[in-house]
């Protein structure tokens, strides 16, 4: 393989290191589906058992402050695969599409000699942009009941096809996405569970949470099978492994929201001989930073500035992986556009890792999410536990506040997330935090202006339909 030298220059750290293409790692990215990060033991979860993810963390680096920009499957995966925030790549709603001229992971890595494949759930469009080689063996249907069991043969063939060119393989699992039917729920007796404080304690909630935990453990078993396959391939030593949990689960206050339990994701990185084992970092990173990091590790250009190569929002955190830098971003940003998941309900957010500020752009409206709160075509409830919340809220003040918290939100919210990880206490009117609120609000304004975010006019059916047709409105791909 032709040798390509590149430098990593870390501002403020004062070091320069070089790697060559001969050192370029294989890449294996394992993506869970709808898994709230702090339901994992790695992040303080009190219930789930995940021995394989825990072992991976003991062998690698755990990010305490990793985020995605939109707590829905399609926008966050578009961000992960493009290195661009939702408004720049164009996928700012679920079930929409990125801009036709977006440059994604395959087009970025293939010129560096990589084979780039994806197995399992896709949920990104258009195909011309996200031109992964399709690798069979993992179910791509996240709502199938039951999920098809995995077959590692195709993934193993992809890993082993050629030792002369590195591989990048994304395995996108479909657990623990609803309907929560995989795994052994009897291992999680509902009466013995420790419910998070943002969930109402009803019998149906406990039953649903039990099935969700069983799917987390089932997902973890697949992580174990994948890592064992990699080990048996003989290529584990030169493979950068990333595990991430995607956005929060389909419980109120997680997926489809800008709370930390929606946007905060698990991220574990292992690269034997390069990443020190058993470490944790407080460096703030986002999904948009992953692709630039892979390019950096592979010896590629991470900051194209030409008209033919749209700018990436992310920047490489390779120095953090190598233990030579303790910080990366100062802030992480997020947004939510609610169409077509329910009536429009746009909101925007920013965190510095310690505090989170949220701005709800139409606070006079009620938040409704059809999958969580609605009825299926056959007349059955999507999530019976939600309706048990409504029933309990009649005479239970705490449950009433949880329902109100989810459906009726103030114009602004401020949380000391480091001390209040479920963000139950809104500090926005507390004068003691006025300076922090002003700082975060101003930086959020700057980011929205940079992204050409029009605010509430973005969350309209007209804008969504235009995006689906590749004729995105209101925003444009920003070029230098």
Image: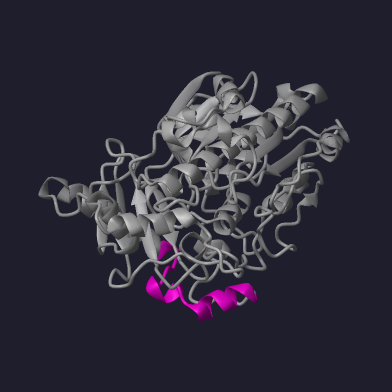
Q: How many marks?
A: 0
Among the 4 quarters of the image, the one containing residue 469: bottom right
- Left/right placement of residue 227 relative to residue 283 reads right
Q: In the image, is residue 389 above or below residue 164?
A: below
Q: Nearer the viewer, residue 10 or 408?
A: 408
Q: Nearer the viewer, residue 213 or 277?
A: 213
Q: Position of residue 157 (x, y in %)?
A: 87, 36
- Magenta segment: does it hold 254? no
Q: Position of residue 169 (x, y in %)?
A: 73, 41
Q: Which contiguous range is marked in magenta? A: 449-469
Q: Position of residue 189 (x, y in %)?
A: 49, 33
User: In the image as oriented, which residue stretches furthest toward the left?
Assistant: 431
From the image, which quarter does the N terminus lie in?
Answer: top right
- Left/right placement of residue 260 relative to residue 269 reads left
Q: What's the coloring here?
A: one colour
Among the 4 quarters of the image, the one containing residue 23: top right
Q: In the image, is residue 170 above or below residue 95?
A: above
Give the residue at x 70% y 65%: 126
Answer whether residue 443 is visible to the viewer in this image.
no
Q: In the image, is residue 378 above or below residue 413?
A: below
User: In the image as oriented, which residue stretches furthest toward the bottom?
Assistant: 462
Answer whether residue 119 is visible to the viewer in this image.
yes
Among the 4 quarters of the image, the one containing residue 100: bottom right
- Left/right placement of residue 336 relative to residue 363 reads right
Q: Position of residue 106 (x, y in %)?
A: 73, 51
| Main secondary structure found in the magenta portion | helix
- Left/right placement of residue 247 relative to residue 126 reads left
Give the residue at x 44% y 42%: 206
Give the residue at x 67% y 42%: 300
């Amino acid at each position: 393989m032709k040798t390509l030298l590149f430098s990593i220059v870390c501002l403020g750290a004062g070091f320069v290191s070089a790697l060559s293409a001969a050192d370029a790692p294989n890449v294996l990215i394992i993506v869970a589906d709808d898994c709230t990060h702090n339901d994992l033991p790695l992040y303080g979860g009190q219930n789930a058992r995940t021995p394989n993810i825990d072992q991976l963390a003991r062998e690698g680096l755990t990010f305490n402050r990793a985020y995605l920009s939109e707590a829905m499957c399609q926008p966050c995966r578009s961000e992960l695969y493009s290195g661009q925030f939702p408004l720049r790549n164009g996928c700012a709603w679920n079930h929409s599409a990125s801009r036709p001229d977006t440059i994604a992971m395959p087009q970025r890595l293939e010129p560096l000699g990589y084979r780039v494949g994806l197995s399992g759930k896709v949920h990104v469009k258009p195909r011309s942009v996200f031109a992964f080689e399709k690798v069979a063996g993992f179910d791509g249907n996240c709502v199938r009941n039951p999920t098809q069991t995995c077959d590692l043969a195709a993934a193993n063939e992809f890993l082993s096809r050629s030792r002369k060119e590195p591989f990048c393989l994304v395995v996108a699992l479909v657990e623990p996405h609803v309907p929560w039917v995989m795994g052994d729920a009897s291992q999680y007796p509902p009466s013995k569970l420790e419910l998070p404080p943002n969930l109402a304690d009803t019998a149906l909630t406990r039953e649903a949470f039990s099935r969700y935990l069983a799917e987390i453990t089932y997902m973890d078993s697949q992580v174990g099978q994948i890592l064992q396959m990699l080990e048996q391939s003989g290529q584990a030593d030169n493979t950068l492994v990333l595990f991430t949990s995607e956005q929060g689960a389909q419980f109120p206050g997680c997926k489809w929201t800008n709370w930390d339990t929606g946007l905060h994701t698990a991220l574990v990185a292992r690269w034997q001989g390069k990443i020190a084992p058993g470490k944790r970092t407080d460096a703030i990173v986002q999904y948009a930073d992953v692709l630039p990091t892979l390019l950096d590790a592979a010896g590629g250009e991470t900051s194209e500035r030409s008209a033919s190569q749209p700018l990436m929002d992310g920047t490489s955190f390779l120095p953090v992986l190598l233990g030579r830098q303790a910080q990366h971003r100062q802030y992480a940003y997020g947004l939510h556009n609610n169409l077509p998941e329910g009536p429009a309900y746009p909101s925007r957010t920013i965190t510095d890792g310690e505090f989170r500020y949220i701005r709800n752009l139409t606070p006079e409206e009620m938040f409704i999410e059809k999958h969580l709160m609605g009825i299926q075509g056959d007349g059955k409830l999507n999530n019976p536990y939600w309706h048990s919340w409504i029933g309990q809220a009649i005479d239970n003040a705490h449950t009433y506040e949880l329902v109100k918290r989810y459906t009726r939100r103030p114009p602004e919210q401020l949380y000391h997330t480091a001390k209040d990880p479920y963000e139950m206490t809104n500090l926005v009117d507390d004068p003691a935090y006025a300076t922090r609120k002003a700082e975060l609000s101003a930086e959020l304004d700057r980011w929205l202006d940079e992204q050409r975010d029009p605010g509430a006019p973005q969350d309209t059916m007209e804008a969504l339909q235009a995006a689906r047709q590749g004729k995105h409105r209101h925003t444009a791909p920003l070029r230098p």
